């Protein structure tokens, strides 16, 4: 049976790809070099088996998502992700599982140029906690608190795919053959919008990543900024795969407005920056959609066919 140290050495020491890691795994702590005139941006997310993902989720999906959701927080702050630590609690020393987990984590870390610089390995019910660190030039980080009346509200990508995949997984609906792969990928392999987050430092007044649901997360922006927002349901981008499963508005609305897990960005932009922003977005090939506007009246309202969607009826809850 491998010792804790064997596990660390075999599965959690990845090739170092970053010059700013002065000392990585192996000592009592890591030593990291934050570039001059930059601020450290740090966030942690914990995934508990049976709570945040089904126990039978493949190890490679767990590893991918654990890091992807953390990278998404960096994107929402406009930060350049750099280093992560991993606190992992393992129920056993299943080396097949560990190998898959390790390869998947290493591969996504490499893709986003983030280095695993330390962690903690313990025994108990499966739980993965990743702390991500990144940096932004001093004073340039995006926050939730600076949306201004008249700013336009945007989202990236498409909304509701992950919630639909989750509903299908829970047996609430069946997915069409042609859409099932795409939708499951949206749930298990969300793509963190890191590149968009970096661009938004020049344009956005506020930004958040959509983890709890579009309305809930936009509401976080409005509360932090002391404003309100009005969005148009018809402007919310939905994927073809989503549409191929659902046409009934009564079913679509709750998934799109309060389903979570998309890890797209929701952000606000001064009106006069829209034109310049749109051309940069086109150059980069990133998809974004303007879905509404910030207003002074508090709360988030969603309009459909000139009527306000009754959010209470959706079972929408404040967190
Ligand atoms: P200590 O007893 O001083 O806390 P550990 O024995 O827990 O140290 O860890 C030894 C080294 O291995 C440390 O550098 C630690 O950051 C690293 N480490 C432990 N577990 C992990 C893990 N799951 N992933 C990455 N690094 C780890
Ligand atoms: Mg120590």
Image: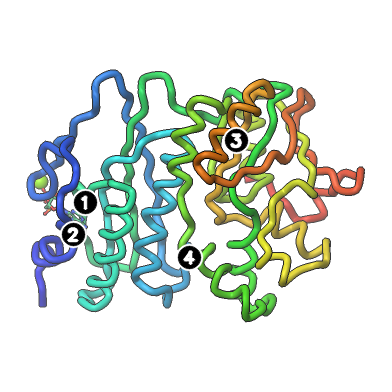
* Nearer to us: label 1 or label 3: 3
Q: Position of residue 232 (x, y in %)?
A: 79, 43
Name the residue rendered at 65%, 58% in the picture.
Answer: 160
Residue denoted by label 4: 188
Q: Residues within 10 Å of mark 2 (few under 14, many from 20)?
A: many
Label 1 to label 4: alpha-carbon separation: 24 Å
Is the distance from the Cβ of mark 2 to the nearest ligand 1 atom less than 8 Å? yes
* Nearer to us: label 2 or label 3: 3
Q: Is residue 206 above or below residue 190?
A: above
Based on the displayed image, in which of its 4 quarters is residue 79 positioned? top left
Q: Do residues under tags 3 and 4 come within 8 Å of each other at their CB atoms?
A: no
Residue denoted by label 1: 119
Label 2 to label 3: alpha-carbon separation: 35 Å
Q: Residues within 10 Å of mark 1 (few under 14, many from 20)?
A: many
Q: Is residue 245 above or below residue 279?
A: below
Q: Position of residue 87 (x, y in %)?
A: 27, 54
Q: Which mark is residue 267?
A: 3
Name the residue rendered at 74%, 31% in the picture.
Answer: 293
Q: Do residues under tags 1 and 4 come within 8 Å of each other at their CB atoms?
A: no
- Viewed as shown, does residue 190 lie left or right of 294? left
Q: Is residue 276 above or below residue 284?
A: above
Q: Position of residue 133 (x, y in %)?
A: 31, 39
- Viewed as shown, does residue 75 lie left or right of 275? left
Q: The residue tagged with tag 4: helix, strand or loop?
A: helix
Q: The residue tagged with tag 3: helix, strand or loop?
A: strand
Q: Do residues under tags 1 and 3 come within 8 Å of each other at their CB atoms?
A: no
Q: Residues within 10 Å of mark 3 (few under 14, many from 20)?
A: many
Q: Position of residue 75 (x, y in %)?
A: 45, 40
* Nearer to us: label 2 or label 1: 2
Q: The residue tagged with tag 1: helix, strand or loop?
A: strand
Q: Earlier in the sequence, mark 3 or mark 4?
A: 4
């Amino acid at each position: 049976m491998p010792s804790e140290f064997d596990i660390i050495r075999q599965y959690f020491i990845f090739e170092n790809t970053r010059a700013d890691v002065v000392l990585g795994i192996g000592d009592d702590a890591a030593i990291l070099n934050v570039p001059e005139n930059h601020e450290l941006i740090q966030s942690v997310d914990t995934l508990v088996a049976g709570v945040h993902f089904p126990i039978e989720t493949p190890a490679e999906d767990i590893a991918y998502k654990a890091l992807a959701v953390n990278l998404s927080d960096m994107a929402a702050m406009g930060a350049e992700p750099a280093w992560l630590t991993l606190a992992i609690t393992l129920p056993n020393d299943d080396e097949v599982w560990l190998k898959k987990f390790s390869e998947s984590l290493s591969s996504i870390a490499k893709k986003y140029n983030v280095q695993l610089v330390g962690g903690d390995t313990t025994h108990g019910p499966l739980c993965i906690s990743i702390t991500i660190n990144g940096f932004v030039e001093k004073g340039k980080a995006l926050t939730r608190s600076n949306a201004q009346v008249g700013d336009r509200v945007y989202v990236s990508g498409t909304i509701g795919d992950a919630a639909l995949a989750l509903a299908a997984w829970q047996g609430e609906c069946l997915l069409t053959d042609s859409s099932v792969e795409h939708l499951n990928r949206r749930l298990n392999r969300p793509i963190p919008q890191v590149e968009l987050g970096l661009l938004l430092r020049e344009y956005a007044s506020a930004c958040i990543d959509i983890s709890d649901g579009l309305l809930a997360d936009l509401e976080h922006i409005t509360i932090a900024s002391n404003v309100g927002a009005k969005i148009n349901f018809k402007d919310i981008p939905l994927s073809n795969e989503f549409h191929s499963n659902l046409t009934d508005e009564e079913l679509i609305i709750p998934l799109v407005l309060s389903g979570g897990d998309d890890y797209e960005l929701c952000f606000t932009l001064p009106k006069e920056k829209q034109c310049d922003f749109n051309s940069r977005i086109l150059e980069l090939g990133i998809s974004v959609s303007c879905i509404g506007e910030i207003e002074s009246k508090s709360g988030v309202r969603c309009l459909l066919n000139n009527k306000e969607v009754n959010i209470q009826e959706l079972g929408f809850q404040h967190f």
